[in-house]
Image (tube, rainbow, N blue to C red):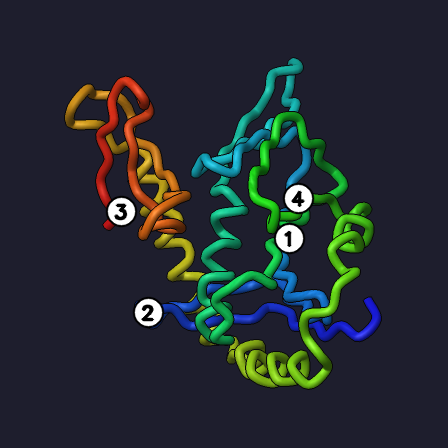
């Protein structure tokens, strides 16, 4: 897009001395667009409020092979959290763009947030275009943000391998946490994100039997 600056594979530091990798960032006069790319085929099922989405592929004998993957909206929300911290940008102006392969089909995917753009590669430009008709950043600010973020795209191969190792450990922990059980009613605990109040944006565990059971616990 005209006047846009792009950064790819940007590794931002987190509080625990680990890093979070952003696939691509576009800094534009209309805002900052943070891209999370998913190279999945088959049918895609998901809800912005659920921790896990599902990929369904047609297997042998026409049986469906289903694979779960971590909610890409939540994944990109983590990226944006640390991007905001690095830029000191704590209000709007940042869009989460989730880009799936053209090999997949959205069968039942629900997005609630106005700042989340869910699309496929062939629709990407058109999906973003409708957000770009306003001016928020001038060229000086665009250059400032680019210069601030560019060093985080220049990691050594050793640093990248360490990032991959830490990422795999975090994903394994998330899968283990999905087996948590409610101590009140015995139903499954599911990972959720607070939408309102002082803890908005924070992850917590809530009973899957809600609203009959309202048990919650903080994510450790």
Look at the numbered disc 4 and give the secondary structure of its residue. Answer: strand
User: In this figure, which residue is indicated by the disc labeled 4?
Assistant: 118
Q: In terms of sequence position, does the residue under pointer 1 or pointer 3 come before the other?
A: 1
Identify the residue position indicated by label 3 in the image. Answer: 219
Residue 31 image point, x, y percent: 66, 66
Crowd rating for badge 4 (residues with CA inside 10 Å; few <14, some 14–19, many 20+): many
- Are there few (<14), some (14-19), or many (20+) residues within 10 Å of tag 2? few
Kindly state the secondary structure of the residue where label 2 is placed: loop
What residue is at 47 percent from the left and 75 percent from the top? 88
Q: Quadrant of residue 214?
A: top left
Q: Secondary structure at mark 3?
A: loop
Q: CA distance from mark 4 to mark 1?
A: 6 Å
Query: Dots 2 and 4: beta carbons under 8 Å?
Result: no
| On screen, residue 41 above or below 220 | above
Residue at image point 21% right, 27% down = 182
Which SS class for mark 1? strand
Real-space Cα separation, disc 1 to disc 2, in angstroms: 24 Å
Per the image, the residue denoted by label 1 is 97
Residue 140 location, quadrant: bottom right
Numbered marks: total: 4
Which residue is under mark 2?
15
The dot on residue 73 is none
Q: Nearer the viewer, residue 24 or 114?
A: 114
Relative to 11, does residue 172 appear above or below in the rendering?
above
């Amino acid at each position: 897009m005209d006047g846009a600056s792009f950064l790819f594979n940007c590794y931002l530091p987190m509080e625990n001395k680990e890093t979070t990798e952003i696939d691509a960032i576009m800094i534009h006069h209309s805002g900052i667009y943070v891209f999370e790319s998913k190279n999945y085929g088959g049918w895609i099922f998901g809800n912005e409020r659920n921790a896990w989405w599902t990929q369904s592929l047609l297997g042998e004998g026409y049986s469906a092979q289903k694979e779960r993957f971590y909610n890409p909206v939540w994944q990109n929300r983590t990226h944006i959290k640390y991007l905001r911290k690095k830029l000191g940008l704590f209000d709007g102006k940042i869009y989460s763009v989730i880009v799936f392969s053209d090999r997949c089909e959205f069968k039942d995917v629900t997005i609630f947030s106005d700042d989340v753009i869910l699309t496929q590669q062939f629709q990407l430009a058109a999906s973003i275009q409708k957000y770009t008709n306003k001016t928020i950043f001038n060229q000086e600010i665009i250059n400032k943000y680019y210069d601030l973020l560019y060093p985080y795209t220049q990691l050594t191969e050793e640093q990248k391998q360490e990032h991959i190792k830490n990422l795999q450990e975090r994903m394994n922990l998330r899968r283990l946490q999905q087996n948590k059980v409610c101590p009140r009613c015995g139903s499954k605990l599911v990972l959720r994100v607070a939408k309102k109040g002082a803890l908005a944006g924070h992850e917590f565990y809530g009973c899957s039997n809600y609203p009959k059971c309202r048990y919650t616990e903080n994510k450790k």
